[in-house]
Amino acid sequence: MPSSPIDVFTHHREHVTFADLITGPDDLPALVEVLDALPDPRSRRGRRYRLGSLLALSLIAVLGGATSLAAITRCIGGYDPGILARAGLPGTVRLAASTLGGLLSRLDGDAFDTATCGYLATIAACIPLEADDDRQACRAPLAGLAVDGKMLRGSRTGEGTAVCLLAATRHDTQTVLAQRQIAAKSNEIPAFLPLLAGLDLAGTVITADALHTHHEHARQLVTAGGHYLFIVKGNQPTLQRRLKALPWRQALLNHHSDERGHGRREIRRMKICTVRPDLPFPHAAQALQVKRRRTDQRTGKTTIVTVYAVTSLPVGRATHAQLAALIRGHWTIEALHHVRDVTYREDASKIRTDAAPPDHGQLPEPGHRPGPPDRLD
């Protein structure tokens, strides 16, 4: 086990110099303090370790590759005494997987999401955006924020349905700034605006798939000082019909890319139209048409897909390259979901009750002898 497990955070904050945030093991108490503010589900009697300390070290263990309660407790027990001391724990920690699991199962998951996402939002606010050309230097920077849902397919709630999470993730750093669990027997649409309610949306472009292309969403985002870029499909038939009827044949080609990779060649062509005042969508300023021509270099098969989108960004607020990057950047949240499912095995979670974490039944390493359980309740 490395002596500095906090290093796993560094890829999110290469340019961050904010002194109050974690920059190394010496600043680990900052994360502990954030998590210590959560409601502690344990009885006051018999508590041995601080809540924030246990959660911070468990989080680092998961980021370091632990995928079960047993693995998390082994990681915590194997940390350097100096790391444990900075996290507010004694030099020797004797923690049982069952007691840690009991704590995590009773933890308020929404409160944990709020605390950790608030912490990450503070970090993200300190990361400067790079200008893509000289003209961008004259404009306030824009940050893309993708909103999308994710299903934990192996989980089940009391209603027998799988747990579904809705998250907002920055395009450039893939930092999750907000996340909430969708209520059982509901869907992502009612959770969209509450998810973003606590965020500062100034200078932010919210990207979302067609599921969230709704009038009220657009109005609230612009009222909050942000912008939107929504994909338009059949759930908005009138809007889709109007977009298809725009004079795309006469429109100039605004952006073009030709890329090869992963055994395929993809050509993307983007055209932009300034929309007419009668377009039936609030605050719509520009319409976009993106044609993707993808050729499988192994089979030679070619597919062509045309995508329409609408945005509240006025003409001149973003360059053509920025608009193209915002459309493509939305899918970084899908890449993050893949990492969570494949690397952290979130999709294999067997959650049945409350906020219990996934435990995939991994056996202890040969010769491992767990110490006496720590009393957490």
Image (cartoon, helix red, strand yellow):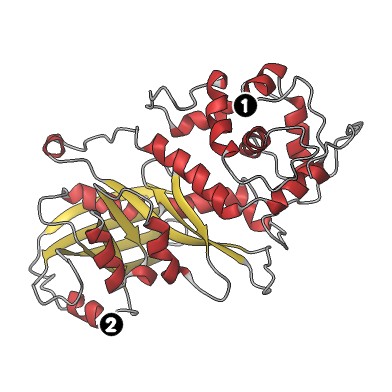
**What's under tag 2, amino acid-wise?**
Pro
Disc 2, SS: helix
Q: Name the residue nearer the viewer: 362 or 6.
A: 6
In the drawing, does residue 10 fall left or right of residue 277?
Answer: right
Residue 214 % position (x, y): 31, 72
Q: Distance between the Cα atoms at labels 1 and 2?
A: 51 Å
| Res. 310 in view | yes
Report the disc number at residue 5.
1
Vertical order, 97 against 303 (above or below): above
**What's under tag 1, amino acid-wise?**
Pro
Q: How many circles with numbers are drawn on the protein? A: 2
Which quarter of the figure is the N terminus placed in?
top right
Which quarter of the figure is the C terminus placed in?
top right
Vertical order, 101 against 35 (above or below): below
Residue 217 % position (x, y): 31, 67
Residue mark closest to the camera, 1 vs 2: 1
In the drawing, does residue 188 fall left or right of residue 260?
Answer: right
Residue 237 % position (x, y): 28, 82
Q: Name the residue nearer the viewer: 253 or 23.
A: 23
* Residue occupying image coordinates x 24% and y 47%: 203
Disc 1, SS: helix
* Residue occupying image coordinates x 56% and y 39%: 37
Quarter of the image for residue 61 reads top right
Q: Are marks 1 and 2 in contact (CB under 8 Å)?
A: no
Residue 42 % position (x, y): 73, 45
In the drawing, does residue 40 fall left or right of residue 177?
Answer: right
In the drawing, does residue 357 fall left or right of residue 290?
Answer: right
| Res. 309 in view | no
* Residue occupying image coordinates x 19% and y 74%: 243
Report the disc number at residue 94.
none
Can you identify the residue that label 2 sits on? 237
